[in-house]
Image (spheres, rainbow, N blue to C red):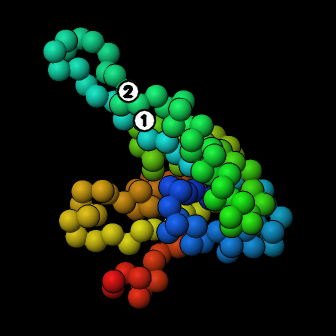
Amino acid sequence: MTFRHIVLSTDLSTEASRGFARVEALAKDVGARLTLLHVVEDHVVPPTVAPYAAPAPVTDPHERMEEARRLLEFQRDEAGLEAELAVTVDSSAARGIVDYAQEAGADLIALSTHGRTGFRRLMLGSVAESVLRHSPLPVLSFPRQQAETEE
């Protein structure tokens, strides 16, 4: 399998940067382009008084995209990554990652898992698990270290 374009997804947390160095090394080894991606989740509030009114966004996604781009640049520079940046909006982070990777012609999606279990996983879900389940592209995931998971 040949990798020409790798999409490295981040939620802008410290945990998400766990695999950055390894993915960059892989991209360099195989001569692939690397894109650091963040998906801004666009949540909407359904109307309660007027049932036929359009749902209203919780916040302006354009403002959140600009802020995300600044944070993405900071995360890239902090990690010393040589990567293009991409910010997109979707109501689901997992779907946004998969859709972006497909539209961008990526050959591989890389991301870190947060290692949530129990109630936290039930309430917050697992973006990584959803990407793994729904992506037609290969997915490289970086799980939390055992010591981190036990804390």
Amino acid found under the numbered disc labelled 2: Pro
For residue 38, side relative to residue 21 (left or right): left
For residue 65, side relative to residue 33 (left or right): left
Amino acid found under the numbered disc labelled 1: Asp
Residue 55 image position (x, y, % from top left): 31, 21
Residue 3 image position (x, y, % from top left): 74, 62
Q: Which residue is mark 2?
A: 57
Q: Please identify the quadrant where the N terminus is shown.
A: bottom right
Residue at 66% in and 55% down: 74
Q: Is residue 149 visible?
A: yes
Q: Is residue 102 visible?
A: no
Residue 143 image position (x, y, % from top left): 47, 75
Instruction: Between residue 18 and residue 105, name the one nearer to us.
Output: 18
Q: Secondary structure at mark 2?
A: strand
Q: Which residue is mark 1?
A: 42
Disc 1, disc 2: CB below 8 Å? Answer: yes
Residue at 53% in and 32% down: 63
Residue at 68% in and 64% down: 78
Earlier-in-chain disc, 1 versus 2? 1
Residue at 49% in and 42% down: 40
Instruction: Between residue 13 and residue 116, name the one nearer to us.
Output: 13
* Residue 100 picture quarter: top right
Q: Is residue 94 above or below residue 60?
A: below
